[in-house]
Amino acid sequence: MTLDDLCSRLLPPDDHVHFETLILEDHHLTLVAAMTAPKALCPDCHQPSQRRHSGYPRTLADLPWALMPVALVLQVRRFFCDTAGCGRLTFTERLPTVAPLYARTTTRLRHSQAYTGLALGGSAGARQLARQALPGSRNTVLRRVRSLSTPAYPPPHVVGIDDWAWRKGHRYGTIVVDLERGCPIDVLEDRLADTVADWFKAHPEVNVVARDRSESYASGIRQGAPEAVQVADRFHLMQNVAAALEQVFSAHHQDLDALNEAQRQALVKRADGSVAVPVPPPPRPPTAQERAESSRARRLALYEKIWELRRQDWSADDIARQLGVHRSTVFRYVQQPTFPERTERRGKGRSVLGPYKDSLVQRWNDGCLNARRLFREITAQGYPGCYNTVVQYTQRLRQAQELPARHRTPRQPRPEVAEPTTPPLTVRGATGLILKREENRDEDDKQQIIQLQAQHAELAEAIALTQDFAALVRQRQGEELQSWLQRAATSCLRPFQGFANGLWEDYEAVKAGLTLPWSTGPVEGQINRLKMLKRQMFGRANIDLLRLRVLYHT
Ligand SMILES: [Zn+2]
C-alpha cells in the first residue's frame, strides 16, 4: 500500500474527494485534497451544472491522526447555474458527507464532539477532547450537543411517567419511559396536568399509562388520552399503605414503648440454649436529651395550638399563616389524633463499638471487668474508637448485672450478660416489619408481630389490613380490592379510612395496578440515571441539554 492509498482511505467518506498531498509540520498535519465530481447540483433548482466559474480552498479541522491534529485543505469549486428561470447565477458545490455549509470542522469531527458532550457534559467533554487532541471548547461541545435532533422512537403503546426533582421540594420535572422497550422517550420541564395532557395528545397511540398516585398526572392523562388505561403503580401503593400504618403506630407509640421496655427486661436466649440478662440501651447524652425535650415541648405547643385553631374551624392555610409554619406541617398534625412522639433512632451496629460488642460481652462474662484491659484488647483487634466509649459500655454491662459501679469482684455469682437479639422497635421499624415478605421473616420478627397484635386491638386491625393489602399488591389480586376497601372504610382506623377514600377516588387505576403487569419500576431506574446526569452538570442543566443527554441513552 502506498502513502497515497493510505491517505485516500483516511479522508472523509466521499467518492469525489481526491487526495493530493500531505504536509507534515512539527505538531500538526495538513492534508490537501480536491473535489473531482464532474458536475454539481444547484441548491435552488436542483439541476446539475458542469460549467465551472472558479475555485477556492476550504480549510476544515478534521479528526486527529494518532494525537496529531489534522487540517483538511479541500479545493472546492464554484459553478454557473444555466437553468432558465433560476434566480441563482453561481453556486459552490455542497459536501453533504464531508462538512456542512460554512462549517470549519468536518462532520465526523462534529459528531465526535457531540457524542463526547452527551456522555460527559460540557466541561468534562472539552477536557476529554483535549486529551485526544480533538479541538472543542466547553461551549463548542454544548453547541454540538444542542444541534443533535431528538432520537426517533417507534410509537409507544405502554408508557410509565413519574416525576423527578430539579430541586427537592421546589421544582419537579417529568420523565416518560416506553415500558415495552425500557427506554426513556421524553423529559418534560414540569409535572403540571396541562403539560402531561399536551404530551399525550401528541401521542394518541399510547393505550396504557403507569403512574404514581398524584392527581395532576391522573387528570393530565384523562385530558390527553381519555381512552388509555391508567395503572397506579404498586410500589407507590405500598408506600401509601405504609404511611397509613405509620400513622397508626405513631398514635400508639406508648404501646411500642411498652413492648420495648418489656423486651429490655426479658432474658436473652443464646445460641447454646443458656440465658443471660440483656445489656441496657445506652443512656442519651444529657445535652441531646435537653435538646430533645425542648424540641418536644416546642412541637407539643405547636400541635396543641394547631388543634385549638382547627377546632375553631380555621382552614389549614389560615392556621399556617397565623402560626408561621408550612401548611404541610398543619396537615400532618391535623391528621394525628394524638401528639406524634419522635421515636429514638438507635439500632445495633450504629456505634463504633458494634463489631466488638460480641467479644466484649464474651470477655465480660469470662470475668474480665477491667475496662482498660478490654480497651487494649479490642484496640489490638482494630477498634478505632476511644477509651471512654468502652468505659460507658462496661457501665451498661455492670448496670445489667446490678453490680456496684466501683471496680470490685463480687461475692455472689453474677448473671451472664448478652446484647438483646432484636433492636428496639421504632415506628418506621415496626412498619417495615409488617411489610416484610412472609418468606423473609425470621423467628424474632414473627414473635414481635404477635406481640404487637396482642398489644392493642387497633394495632391488630391495622396489621391485618396492611398485610392483606400487601398480599393484594404482591399477588395482583385486583378482584379482592373492593372487599378490602370496604373493610378499611368501616374500620375504626382513621388513617386507613383516609387511604381507602383515596383509593376509591382512583379506583380504576388502582384496580388496573393490581391486575396488569405494568409498573413504573423501569421509570425509577431512568430517574436515577437522569439524576446522575443532572448532578454531573452541577445543577446548571437546562431542560434541552438534560433532555438530549437522557434520551441518547446508549
Ligand atoms: Zn439553479
Image (cartoon, rainbow, N blue to C red):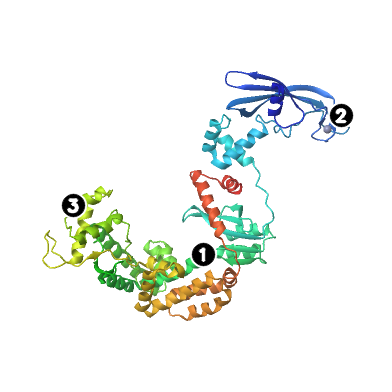
**Splitting the image into four quadrants, where does ligand 1 fall?**
top right
Q: Write the residue at 37% across / 67% down.
A: 427
Q: Nearer the viewer, residue 39 or 423?
A: 423
Q: Which residue is mark 3?
A: 373
Measure how far apart labels 3 and 1 are at the Cα level. 51 Å
Any part of residue 285 in sight:
no
Q: Is residue 126 left or right of residue 384?
A: right
Q: Nearer the viewer, mark 3 or mark 2?
A: 3
Earlier in the chain: of badge 1 and badge 2, it is: 2
Q: Which mark is residue 82?
A: 2
Disc 3 residue type?
Arg
Measure how far apart labels 3 and 2 are at the Cα level. 103 Å
Report helix, strand or loop for mark 2: loop
Q: Is residue 3 above or below residue 335?
A: above
Disc 1 residue type?
Phe
From the top left corner, tell me how far across and down residue 366 is, in percent: 20, 60
Earlier in the chain: of badge 3 and badge 1, it is: 1
Report helix, strand or loop for mark 1: helix
Q: Nearer the viewer, residue 381 or 395?
A: 381
Q: Which mark is residue 235?
A: 1
Q: Is residue 121 above or below residue 135?
A: below
Which residue lies most toward the front here?
Answer: 272
